[in-house]
């Protein structure tokens, strides 16, 4: 069982991220220059946290992605994926089975909050 999107959002706030944008499909969170999305459609939580594609390689040290990528026109802070019929923004989805795993991932990827 994975953490639900609302649980991931709470952990991001504890880690110093602040909500930047809210849409029907996503919450956007910012901390300094870092930006992540919470996929509100991830009812089972497997793809609840979406990170910027440039962080993919670094993130592999801390957790495996849930899939190769997740596209959505709601991920406006992320680059466009030009490989499909539709041009949508994309990020790398992750799911976490515990708060501790998510905390370790956030600390490893983004460092301690200021």
Image (tube, grey):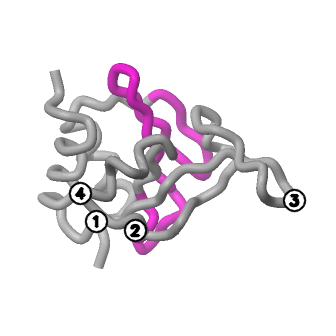
Q: Nearer the viewer, residue 97 or 7?
A: 97
- What residue is shown with label 1? 96
- What residue is shown with label 3? 85
Q: CA distance from mark 3 to mark 4?
A: 32 Å
Please state which of the two labelled residues, at mark 2 or mark 4, is closer to the viewer. 4
Q: CA distance from mark 3 to mark 1?
A: 31 Å
Q: Earlier in the sequence, mark 4 or mark 1?
A: 4
Magenta-drawn segment: 20-48
- What residue is shown with label 4? 62
Residue 63 percent coordinates (x, y)? 28, 62
Proximity of marks 2 and 1: CB atoms separated by less than 8 Å = yes
Q: Residue at x 41, y 54 (%)?
A: 49
How dense is the environment of label 1, judged by Cα within 10 Å: few (below 14), some, or many (20 and up)? many
- Image position of 48 with respect to 18: above or below: below
SS at circle 2: loop
Q: Nearer the viewer, residue 106 or 7?
A: 106
Residue 21 percent coordinates (x, y)? 53, 32
Q: Residue furthest right?
A: 85
Q: CA distance from mark 2 to mark 1?
A: 8 Å
Q: Residue at x 43, y 33 (%)?
A: 35
């Amino acid at each position: 069982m994975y953490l639900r999107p609302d649980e991931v959002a709470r952990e991001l706030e504890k880690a110093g991220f602040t909500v930047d944008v809210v849409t029907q499909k996503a919450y956007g969170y910012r901390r300094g220059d870092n930006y992540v999305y919470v996929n509100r459609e991830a009812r089972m939580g497997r793809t609840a946290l979406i990170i910027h594609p440039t962080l993919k390689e670094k993130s592999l040290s801390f957790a495996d992605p849930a899939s190769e990528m997740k596209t959505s026109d709601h991920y406006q802070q992320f680059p466009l994926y030009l490989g499909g019929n539709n041009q949508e923004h994309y990020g790398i989805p992750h799911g976490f089975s515990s708060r501790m795993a998510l905390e370790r991932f956030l600390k490893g990827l983004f460092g301690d909050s200021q």
